[in-house]
Amino acid sequence: MSSYRQTTFRRFGIELFKRDGHTVVNTNGYRLCVLPFFFKNKVNFVRSNRSSAFSTSSSPILTSSTSASSSTPTSSTPSTSTPQAIASSYAASEDAGIPTPLNQPIFDILSRAKLLTTLSHENLVEFIAAQPSQKHHDQVLMITEDYETSLESLLKNGQAVLSHDQIQLYSYQILKALSYLHGRSITHRNLSVENIKIDSNNNIKLSNYALYYLSNQGENVSFPIGNLCNLSPQSLLRDLKGSPNPKCDVWALGCVLLQLAYGKCPWADRDPNVVINRLLHLSNLPASQRYNIDTHSFESVSAEKPLGTISSQMSNNSNMTNFLNNLSPPLNRLPEPLVELIRACLTPNSADRPSSADLLEHPYFYDIMGKDPYAPKYVERPSVKSLQLPDDLSSIKADSGHERSDLDIFSGAELYYLWRLAGGDLDKELVAQSLANSAPSVHKLPNFVPLVKSSHSMSNSLGDLMTSPICAKRTAGSEGSSTQSHDFKAILYNHRTCTLSIDSLVERIREAYEIKEELLSEDVGGDGYLFTRGTNKPASSSGDGSASLNSPQARNQDDELDYQIARLSAFHKALYQYVYEDAIQAQPQIIRMAKFGIPTILRGDIWAAILGVVHADAVSIYHSINLDVRGPNDKQFELDIPRCHQYHPLLSSPSGHAQLFRILKAWSLLNIEKGCYWQGLDNVASPFVVHCYHDEPMAFACLKSFVDKYLSILYVPNNYAALSEIMLTYTQLLSYHDPELSCHLINVQLEPNLYAIPWFITIFAHLLPLDKIDILWDTILLGPSSFPYFFAVSIMIQFRTSMLAKASLENCIKTISKISSCDIEQCVSDALDKFNNTPLSTTISKVVSHTDDELWWMQEVSMETRKLELFPRIGIHDVINNPNTKILDIRPASQFQQCYYPKSVNIIYHGQATPQSTPATSSAQGSYPAPPSSMQPSGQPSPAPQTKPSKPFNPAILEQYRGRPIVVIAPRGEGIEFCNQLVQWKFPFVALLNGGMDALIHGAQSLLVMNTNTNNGQ
């Protein structure tokens, strides 16, 4: 087998590689499917009046309670009633099925779904997403990986009995997947031959493992989950929710192995009541069915034993042992280790039943484990070491004589992301495949529910209930029928799925992969902070980036899809290098590509790379913090977290609250000496929690790096000086770009301290919803720490019309309260434009400690003096590098004629301007006086007046410079009044040269015009 090198960030999905100069796609039979289910308890199983005789029973068979108080698992206390009596004592009550808005149950479902998306195992189908249906508020759509072939289809297609080698391979891979799930406290609870898929490489892929976990162990759904033939005794003796004990999956595995060995389930029957009683009998529980060892069949009998000795009876395995010993054909035709494995799985008492992890050590798997490249001892590496070792993707086997190179893998989540970008619509697919219609929600419940009969006219037994004419109609090939191949209706949940066609998408990926270098050629350069394509921003409504294809910058949807495919592939390679090889070398490449847009699907990984977070280091630091001790801010965290972005399904869930609490506590404990928690840090942490959900070390490390870069001067015990500096810089930049709005806010006495402090102390995470924060932070993370100033200015200017129209302080505050509804993409675009067209020195401190008095302009200016300045100060480099700047020199004419900056204009200013005496000209900036007609612009220095002017300065002479950057050169200690006047006259882009002519003489003397002959003015 030829060797190859992994260069992809993903482990599982469709594989792309180069072979002999051509791109090959290996899908392994990969498909995408959607499984819809209704999460609300629309049908309640309640006791009927006839059940009073059995009201003392606390362990009913297959019953359900939907009240909040009954969420605790029922006790296993023995009952004296028979299974038939218990089943008949329960009836169904109807519900109106009226849709309601999203509420906490669906938030909990979406929160749990986020954990499932982090699972990655070679024998599990990838859980891609869970999202609410657009048509039904009580319906959730699960999007997962899927394959056409299953164990059920193998049995259905004539393979009545699988070979011993196949059973060994399949059972080993099933156990590996179950052990992986159980190690993460997830019970499959739905293991059956129809939910065990097989890819084209003959690898097992467990599917439909998400439903029981998403529904909080069956609490949030009104139907039982699982194949009735595979239910463990504990599941039968509990209620409709079944047993959360992961060992119920081990029992189901034993049932599956028997089915693989015999081609059918030995205790199957058309009547669910018969199946239940057969399972109860095999578990040594009272039942109306017994197994006759002479005829090798089940027979109906009268139940004699009471249920009072359940625990002792379940510990005795005689019935199951006799049954297995007397199967026809006998089990002894199978290898002895396999027989031992089946017997171990089918131990009725769960306390005696081995776990999935224990069974992996069974001798039956010794030989196959040594050949498994994904053996658990290799997969489950220590977390601090695992990411330093490349994954061995041995599923890719190079043909003899053919070298594979440039390997890449697109995960199911990325396929779904691209499918949406290509215009895919889930609701349309569901309607097209008859899985969605306008019927009330109650009419789409699972197929065992009667929809017409009331609770007073229903059958008494659960068996009659499940085999009623309505159920038979729904399970006989109708729209909602199950895909099972058996002649009995044992499936209590409709497993029909909606398959998404990705054939054309896969071909597009192959074509784009071939020419990805050509597609990415436009990315060359990218030295600025501008996004050149404008296709990275997801629409706030969908969040998947699909709406961004309609961006004016995009060429067309097809070309843009190819470009996004190429970008994903390029990010795969860069992220792989960052994670596994050289993070320092890979980070600049990731930053360069991110300037052209960050794909939504990779945002968390890319943010971490931009912030310089390495997973191994993050785990090491996070786990070194003792979170068990009581922190100084724990009480405040408990108050703040419930108010933090509670509209978001992840952050509103108990799991989200717990993760956010631990991350904040870790930051607080790590910075207990030099740092200080201020309200708002929870908002800053929220985006990282969402993008690194269930990866707390990464979320914590990203938060720490982000705070260190942007907020380190604010999260300290005394941040007054830092906040004052920030508020002053923001005010001056607002005056620089929109002096009219700035003066208006000053006139109504709306100081930035009243509204802008939460903006900067949270980098707008307190102000904006999370989808808008993502778009903003995509840019902020790539820019300097000064970029938030420009976004604040842009967001105010976007609402300037409303604020200028309202003259009172109260009305302006009301307008600011609506700023969260801003057009975020327009604000980011405007902020980038302002950032790129504003002198950098406006936001950089010009103070140098221990400076000589000769360099007076580098000495600190008191905050009291700076607060009088409505304008920013700039350095000489910004004057030199911007030829479009108009220099106004207000020094005395004699000094100006001796030395001046080229093309500067000498302005004689001695105080306030005269009242407006000339006609005013209206502009977008407001009204200002028109310049005299005799005034002509000149680049030469004005002749020095021989006498002091008798009239105050008239601003009309400056109108020709309106709209251009204006830099004022003034004598030491002067210029503040003149610059403030320009701002009040609504001149934009006004700045004062810090240090004036002294700074120019010291740093750029060669550029100045020096005139020794001052008499002729030359």
Image: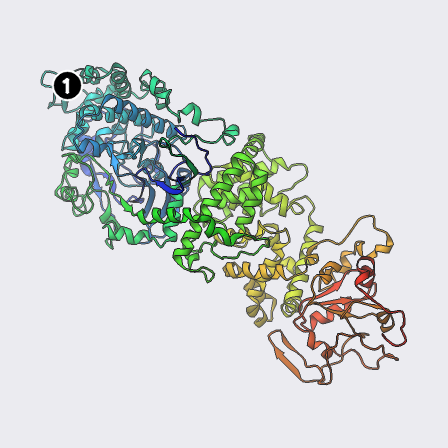
Query: Which residue position holds label 1?
Result: 329
Nearer to us in this view, 14 or 857: 14
- Could you tell whether 792 is left or right of 506 in the image? right
| Amino acid type, label 1 | Pro
Disc 1 crowd rating (10 Å Cα; few below 14, some 14-19, many 20+) is few
**Residue extending furthest toward the left:** 295
Please, what secondary structure does the residue beneath circle 1 have?
loop
Q: Residue at x 65, y 71 (%)?
A: 963
Figure coloring:
rainbow
Q: Position of residue 961 (x, y in %)?
A: 69, 74
| Residue 174 x, y percent position in the rendering | 32, 28
Which quadrant holds residue 738?
bottom right
Residue 677 location (% of width, % of height): 62, 43
Note whether residue 286 is visible.
yes
Identify the image quadrant of the N terminus: top left
Quarter of the C terminus within the rendering: bottom right
In terms of depth relative to the viewer, which is nearer, 945 or 683? 945
Which residue is depicted at the point 34% across and 18% down?
A: 367
Relative depth, front residue between 17 and 970:
17
Residue 539 x, y percent position in the rendering:
44, 56
Q: Tell whether 387 sits left or right of 1013.
A: left
Is residue 690 visible from the viewing direction of this image?
A: no
Q: Nearer the viewer, residue 779 or 18?
A: 18
The residue positioned 23% from the left and 41% from the top of the image is 494
Image height check: is 289 above or below 108?
A: above
Location of residue 1012 with respect to 505 vertically, above or below: below
